[in-house]
Image: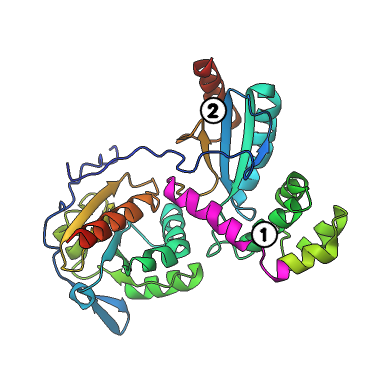
Amino acid sequence: MSKTQWEAVLTVPVDGERDHVQGLPTAAVTLVQYGDYECPYCGEAYPIVKEMLARMGEATRFVFRNFPISTSHPHAEHAAEAAEAADAQGRFWEMHDLLYERQRHLTDEDLHAYAEELGLDVERFDKEMAEHVHADRVHEDFMSGVRSGVNGTPTFYINGVRHDDSYEAEVLLDALETAAASAR
Amino acid sequence: MTEAPHHATPLPPGTVAPDFELPSTPDQRVMLSDFRGQPVILVFYPEDWSPVCSDQLGLYQAVLAEFQKFGAELIAISVDSAWSHLAFAKDRNLHFPLLADFEPKGEVARAYQVYRDGAGTSERALFVIDAEGVIRWSYVSPVGVNPGADGILRALEELRGKEEAT
């Protein structure tokens, strides 16, 4: 066979210390998303993921990794760094949510305003943004995605295997429930 | 009519990559053999402007620095004209050559066995060619599916491994 096929699996396992995780380590299902804050499809998936997590309850934990495609989305890289800068102050998910809720407004001034809105130490935030302190972390996420077969955003992995179907609520819920059932 | 099934068998590994000369801009041409001495990633994609193509090439632009760590050159080819390529590359911030397999239409895609007769475009196909001009990896993706970059990186790693072993 000259046509090589391969299974797309998560090459860098979820690490509770390093990754941004919502939910319990004991959850039967781990949903990993590679996302770009400026990507409209990710914006579309954002409320769906929230709904899924609410419906699945403790059975599912959610991990978000950065995958900014800067060539298509000029603000995505800085937005990802802003979420990491918020993480440095223990506020990752609040910034993550805010960025998706206002994804049409992601200029550097907007990011600064969101840091203020969240009550972050803005001086520290601005310094880390200016020095691109978190750029390496964002790139690590990006490369782990590339090596895992992320081929656009959002790309989801359910218990380590790429979800090659739509992220419509019913389809995603069905896949999560199937994974939960087989993990039992 | 249903869409033609994707059954193309691209030129397999071990085959000498057919040389070609194609326009990269309205007044410049590129030959595959210009890149002898370094690995080449040849990306056939169906058309400029279609959503999957843009995602795929945008991703490759984002991964370009990783490809360059292997000394590899990335070249994309479609049946669109050089003028279309020029506008497309500018619009999408693509900084690698887009070659126009425009006249005779699809001749290079045919030589690599990735032309889709009914559609009049090429398959979405990837080739990794070594420094001696031999195909080391080939892959055809379903037309609507972005094949990502992991297969390319794996092929480049294998190439490097072989070079180090000799």
Residue A183 or A36: which is nearer the viewer? A183
> Could you give the CA–CA distance between mark 1 and mark 2, rounded to whole angstroms?
31 Å
**Number of callouts:** 2
Tag 2's secondary structure? helix
- The residue that disc 2 covers is A171
Image quarter hosting the C terminus of chain B: bottom left
Residue A133 colored magenta?
A: yes
Q: Please state the horizontal and vertical placement of residue A2, each as a whole percent of the image.
A: 18, 45
Start-end of magenta stretch:
A129-149
Task: Report x, y in % for residue B107.
Answer: 17, 64
Q: Nearer the viewer, mark 1 or mark 2?
A: 1
Q: Is residue A107 above or below residue B137?
A: below
Taking depth in this image into account, of A66 and B19 the one nearest to the observer is A66
Quarter of the image containing the N terminus of chain B?
top left
Q: Residues within 10 Å of mark 2 (few under 14, many from 20)?
A: few
- Residue position for label 1: A81
The amino acid type of the residue labelled 2 equals: Val
Of the residues shown, which amino acid type is indicated by label 1? Glu
Q: Main secondary structure of the magenta part?
A: helix
- N-terminal of the pair, mark 1 or mark 2, is 1
Viewer-closest of A64 and A163: A64
Give the residue at x 23% y 61%. B164
Q: How far across and down, in percent of the image, does residue A7 sit? A: 36, 37
In the drawing, does residue B122 fall left or right of residue B107?
A: right
On the question of residue B47 being in view, the answer is yes
Left or right: where does residue B62 sit relative to residue B1?
A: right
A67 drawn magenta: no
In the displayed structure, does residue A15 sit left or right of residue B64?
right
The chain under label 2 reads A
